[in-house]
Image: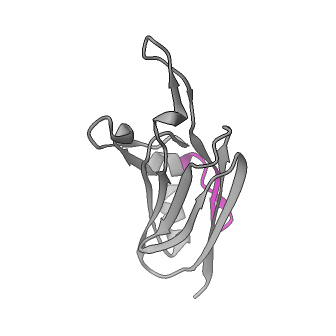
Amino acid sequence: MSDLSFKCKISNKTEFTDLGIEMWLDNTKFYDSKILPGQTPIEYTFPEDENDHVLSIILKNKTVKHTTIDTDGNIKSDAVLEIQDITLDEIALGQKFYDIADYTHDYNGSENWITEKFYGTLGCNGTVKFTFYTPFYRWLMEHM
């Protein structure tokens, strides 16, 4: 049985140092940290088996202090994290990751929970889920 490697970069273009990310593969948490300004590379290696998998990326710790709203209710600035350069088994997933992933959040507690497409930016506390299966080459042949 061989190993697969997941890699990505998380970009924080703000001065905030308290936004946090957790990453899970199925029931295993493999990353839990605050994301400092700049780019943070993340890598995780796991055994390739013959199972379905769920990769979860969770934004946490975002509060109202991270968003500036003008008197008309327009967002003037907002702290967001961008997920970039996503690879699995050294293969860039690019748009395919965004096509499959979904993002569940509640606008940081201001509305009901919703699930929508994920476009690469985490702006609300919530969870992005990407499902795939292994052997990964079979998944690739069906989805690329």
Specify the farthest residue to the front.
Answer: 65
Q: Is residue 86 magenta?
A: yes
User: Where the N terminus falls, by quadrant?
Assistant: bottom right
Picture quadrant where residue 77 is located: top right
Q: Position of residue 89 (x, y in %)?
A: 64, 68
Q: Magenta segment, which residues?
A: 84-96
Q: Position of residue 103 (x, y in %)?
A: 41, 47
140 displayed left or right of 112? right
15 displayed left or right of 107? right
Specify the farthest residue to the right.
Answer: 38
| As drawn, 118 above or below 26 | above
**Residue located at (29% from left, 43% from top):** 113
**Residue located at (63% from left, 42% from top):** 16
| As drawn, 72 above or below 123 | above
In terms of depth relative to the viewer, which is nearer, 55 or 48? 55
| As drawn, 130 above or below 116 | below
Identify the colour scheme used. Answer: one colour
User: Where the C terminus falls, by quadrant?
Assistant: bottom right
**Residue located at (63% from left, 52% from top):** 35
